[in-house]
Image: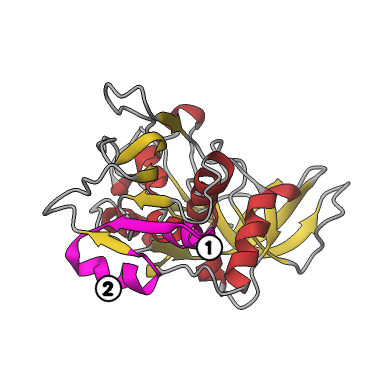
Amino acid sequence: MRAITQTEFGGPEVLTLSDLPKPAPVPTEVLVRVHAAGINPVDWKTRAGGGMAGLQTFPLVLGWDVSGVVEEVGFGVTTLKPGDEVYGMPRFPHAASAYAEYVTAPSRHFARKPAGLTHVEAAALPLAALTAWQVLVDTADVQPGQKVLVTAAAGGVGHLAVQIAKARGAHVIGTARAAKHAFLKDLGVDEVVDHTVAEYDRADVDVLVDLVGGSSPAPVRSGGLFVGVPSGVAVGPRDDIRTSPILVEPDRAGLEAITALVESGQLRVHVDATFPLEEAGQAHALGEKGRTQGKLVLEV
């Protein structure tokens, strides 16, 4: 099979199109023919030696977001069958090797692809949407009427987080450059803040989701929650708020909840650009500029 490999850490140029043996599923695993693979910041951070690099071995095949079709099931799998269209974020933070024509992974790391989505759209969802879901639902338990502030709200995780918060009945504030404000308004964001001009400075936020790193905790009300994604929390000397780091986990139940939001029209994913598999390096170079609106996806 074709796959994008690297044998050292470095810039986008270390990503090479290679031929590898097609994997075979062991018991409880499925073999998925990959139609599309989403790209996330953790991909290029890991490629360069950061991110999840400490858990990887060479030769390394990057990528965690997968959408494709089940081709074979291992012994014991009862929830999926060949021909099922699935999507997921298998094995994270260990290697899932999604930048390839086939992947194997535990069957329960996948869910059925949302009806009506292309494989490209579905591949853009798992890691970013599960991050947002696990922050807003599992960690913060956002309730109707609460105020939720999301930084980098037009990015991969951000544009999904604001929609999930809205689906929970929250009043949502998003930060982004002025050029992206119309996009956020179209997603249902109640207030948009141009962070290049001024920060949101009212201390009335129930949940602050920091997708940039190092954001000020000043907007969080006393007793509110500050969640740092993914680098943890460094909020300074405030002991009147709750803080939490988070790292996304494979989560079939979360994926099924995300599917329900997509199919009910409450959540849509924006794909900024697609690249063929062999242009993974170019995709990384674009992503590292930090100006992407929504997601980047490899078409496999």
Q: Quadrant of the N terminus?
A: bottom right
* Amino acid found under the numbered disc labelled 1: Ala
Left or right: residue 278 versus residue 136 is: left
Q: Is residue 277 visible?
A: no
The residue lying at 78 percent from left, 58 percent from top is: 72
Q: In the image, which disc is placed on residue 167?
A: 1
Q: Which residues are magenta?
A: 162-190
* Residue position for label 2: 182
Q: Residue at x 31, y 27 (%)?
A: 234
- Left/right placement of residue 297 relative to residue 94 reads left
Q: Residues within 10 Å of mark 1 (few under 14, many from 20)?
A: some
| Residue at the extreme bottom of the image, as rendered | 116
Say what amino acid the circle numbered 2 marks: Ala
Residue 123, image x, y percentages: 53, 62
Quadrant hosting residue 231: top left
* Rendering coords of residue 34 (x, y %): 60, 62
- Residue 156: where, in percent of width, then height? 39, 57
Q: Quadrant of residue 236?
A: top left
**Residue 171 in sight here:** yes
- 270 displayed left or right of 255: left
